Every structure is written in C-alpha cells, then in structure tokens.
Image: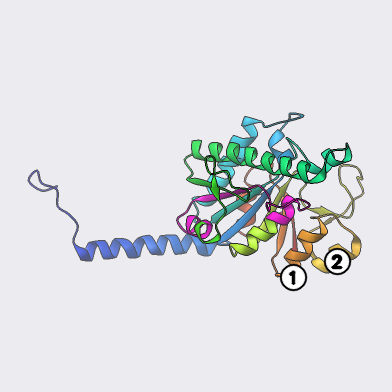
Amino acid sequence: MRGGFFVFPSLAQISWLKKIMYFCTTFFQKRMQYKRILLKLSGEALMGERQYGIDPRRLAEYAQEIKAVVEKGIEVAIVIGGGNIFRGVAGASNGMDRVQGDHMGMLATVINGLALQSALEDAGVYTRLQTALEIKDVAEPFIRRRAIRHLEKGRVVIFGGGTGNPYFTTDSAAVLRAIEINADVILKGTRVDGIYTADPEKDKTAIKFDDISFKEVLNKGLKVMDTTAFTLSQENELPIIVFDMNKKSNLMKVVTGEKIGTKVNL
C-alpha cells in the first residue's frame, strides 16, 4: 500500500513466490512416506461405543486425523464399509436374496460416506463423494479421471457403493479403487494394531507381525482381507498396512513412515 493505493507485486515477485510455495510443498511431501493413499475404514469403526449406527464423536475424530494428513500435502481417497447399518451376507443368511441384500449393503456405504463427507467439510476439508451406483442427486458417479483430478486439487475423495456389483466386499472395492487411482498404499484402519497369529482380543498369546509377505499371509491362513481383494492387491504389487485407526495420530505416523501396525509387502 503506497499513498493510499494498492501496489500489485511484479512478475518477478510472483515468480519467486511460486518457487517458494513449490519448495515448501515439495519439502513436506519428501518427509511423507507416501504421496497418495487409499484409507479403508470399516462401517463398524463409525459406531464408536455404540451398538449400531454412527457415532458423531468418532466421525469428528476421524475427520481431524484425515485433515492433519491432507494439510501435509498427502492425497487421500477413502473407501468405507456399511456393516454398522447393514450387511448383505447377514441378510442372505436370514433368507433374503443375496443380490438384494448386497445392494442394501452398498446403499449403507453411501450413507456412511455422506456422514464422513459432512464431518470432513465441518472440519474445513474439501471433499467429494463418488458412488459406483448412480445417485446423481446425492453424489457424483465414479469417474476415474475426475477422481484423480479431485485428488490432485487436494480434495479428499470418498468412494461409496462398493464396486457396484453384488458378491464383492468393500475390501475388494478398496483394492480396485486404489489400483485405478494409482495409490501408493492401502491403509486399513481397524481397532487392532496390526496382524497377529490369532485374534488378539480372544487369544492373549497371539504374536504380532511388524512386516509380512503376501505369501506368508496366505500360507498361514491369516485374515487381512477377503481372498479376492488380497490376491488383487498382490498381483498389482500394492502394499497394505493394517493399523489401529482409533489411536490418536496413528494415521499421521503411518504416512510419515513410522513403524505402526503391520505392513504386507511382496
């Protein structure tokens, strides 16, 4: 401001500002282990301490964890399950048509996606919800190029509706979308802090793996994802990290390369 008039910066000054901004962005990204991640969350994780549905407090906690990562320049895509509302497999076991039940489960993931989108936007994070089933008044249809463009602009992209096909789990949807958007890794956020030889909540003698190969997981019969999803990840050389999403700052620790959870590699 000179003499009451605003002086616009010169082209040279603008050029220097761009260089500084680029340096800062590059510096923070170099400190991060990954540039683009796909975060897989279970529907049950949204229940918090409840027995059913969605816990607003848990949603807000997740939104803050995701926001912190986005602010470091990491591109974040999310696939979320619907088990807190409805499971197609459970419906089929009670006599419901499996295809109908799976479609209901897909809609449950859209409900969870809308809830997470709202929580993220309340936290000041630009978010887009894309669905495998076309629900144009609620969300964008899944379009690969559009999803990648959103990520490049710093928006979080939530993928709802699973794969859009019955008989496929949201684990399969997570791996498929991760491959399609060229994610560096799948981060599977659970309530357990990694992969164990047995269920640690039932077997206190269970031993945790820090690192394990895809082949070892299959040979030992360990449950990480369903076989279809796990094999697809293996074939595309896409690493998986299983970690405790409910522990504060764990997501940030994973993307900065700290030894959190269990990493599944080739």
Residue at 80% in and 66% down: 214
Q: Is residue 253 visible?
A: yes
Instruction: Place residue 259 in its image quadrant.
Output: bottom right
The answer to whether 182 is drawn above or below residue 141 in the figure is below
Residue at screen point 51% across, 46% down: 127
* Residue stretch in magenta: 147-173
- The answer to whether the residue labelled 2 contacts the one labelled 1, judged by CB atoms less than 8 Å apart, is no
Q: Which residue is mark 1?
A: 235
Q: Is residue 165 above or below residue 234?
A: above
Three-letter residue code for mark 2 = Glu
Q: Give how far apart the Cα atoms at labels 2 and 1 are.
A: 15 Å
Q: Which residue reaches farthest left?
A: 3
The quadrant of the rendering that contains the C terminus is: bottom right
Quadrant for residue 230, please give it. Answer: bottom right
What's the coloring here? rainbow
Disc number for residue 216: 2
Nearest the eye: 34 or 160: 160
Q: Toward the viewer: 230 or 187?
A: 230
Q: Is residue 155 left or right of residue 178?
A: left
Residue 62's x, y, as percent? 61, 41
Choose top left, top right, bottom left or bottom right for residue 96: top right
**Where 199 falls versus 37 (above or below)?**
above
Secondary element at tag 1: helix
Which residue lies at the image location 55% right of the left edge and 60% below the top edge?
144
Earlier in the chain: of badge 2 and badge 1, it is 2
Element assignment for label 2: helix
Q: Residues within 10 Å of mark 1 (few under 14, many from 20)?
A: few
Residue 154 is a magenta residue: yes
* Residue 28 image point, x, y percent: 48, 59
